[in-house]
Amino acid sequence: MESCPSVKNILVLDSEGKRVAVKYYSDDWPSLSSKQAFEKSVFAKTHKTSARTEAEIVMFDSYIVVYKFIQDLHFFVTGGDDENELILASVLQGFSEAVDHLLRNKVHKKAALENLDLIFLCLDEIVDGGIVLETDAKAIVEKLSGHGLEGSGSITEQTISNALATAREHFARSIFS
């Protein structure tokens, strides 16, 4: 029986190896210190390579890590040692292209920090609980920009209205339960 493609984590680090946006989908790193140690180790192993045009693949501590650098940001997708490298590479490609489009081709640390909400929404569209949902950058961007939604405003307005709607639902459920 084959399982769904899955990832262990997706990391976006700056040129010094510091966190910009990270999301872990497995309990392989149970504490914050173990997560930071993994990030530091992965960065140390990869930062001297030239993964600017094509994604690179490396085996690291029994994990497959696919990575790519854009400007001063380092993108990493980690999977188990039995995961398909091509699927991990397509997750990385879809994520980095979607971020590039959402940041209007200005992929650098300052722009990423200013639009961190979009980056995390992008992560949520790509992977849910470690299971790969989408790898097509165009489809991801369309979902985030609200194409096909009536009266769609800016992405930030949609995010706030979605959050309020969810809060209303949870509040209503808690009252009637």
Image (tube, rainbow, N blue to C red):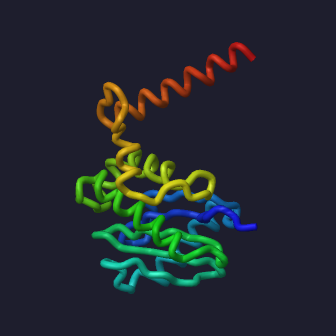
* Quadrant of the image occupied by residue 60: bottom right
Name above or below for residue 42 compared with residue 108. below
Question: Which of these two is toward me, 33 or 11?
Answer: 11
x then y, percent, for residue 84: 58, 75
Q: Quadrant of the C terminus?
A: top right
x then y, percent, for residue 19: 45, 62
* Quadrant of the image occupied by residue 20: bottom left
Name above or below for residue 95 compared with residue 15. above
**Which residue: 65% across, 78% down?**
81
x then y, percent, for residue 132: 56, 58
Name above or below for residue 99 compared with residue 172. below
Residue furthest top in the image? 176
x then y, percent, for residue 15: 36, 72
106 lies left or right of 77: left
Question: Which of these two is toward me, 24 or 173?
Answer: 173
Question: Which of these two is toward me, 25 or 30?
Answer: 25
**Which residue: 69% across, 14% down?**
175
**Which residue: 32% across, 78% down?**
52
Q: How many marks?
A: 0
Question: Which of these two is toward me, 132 or 130?
Answer: 132
**Which residue: 47% across, 72% down?**
89
Residue furthest left in the image? 105
Q: Quadrant of the N terminus?
A: bottom right
35 lies left or right of 74: right
151 lies left or right of 79: left
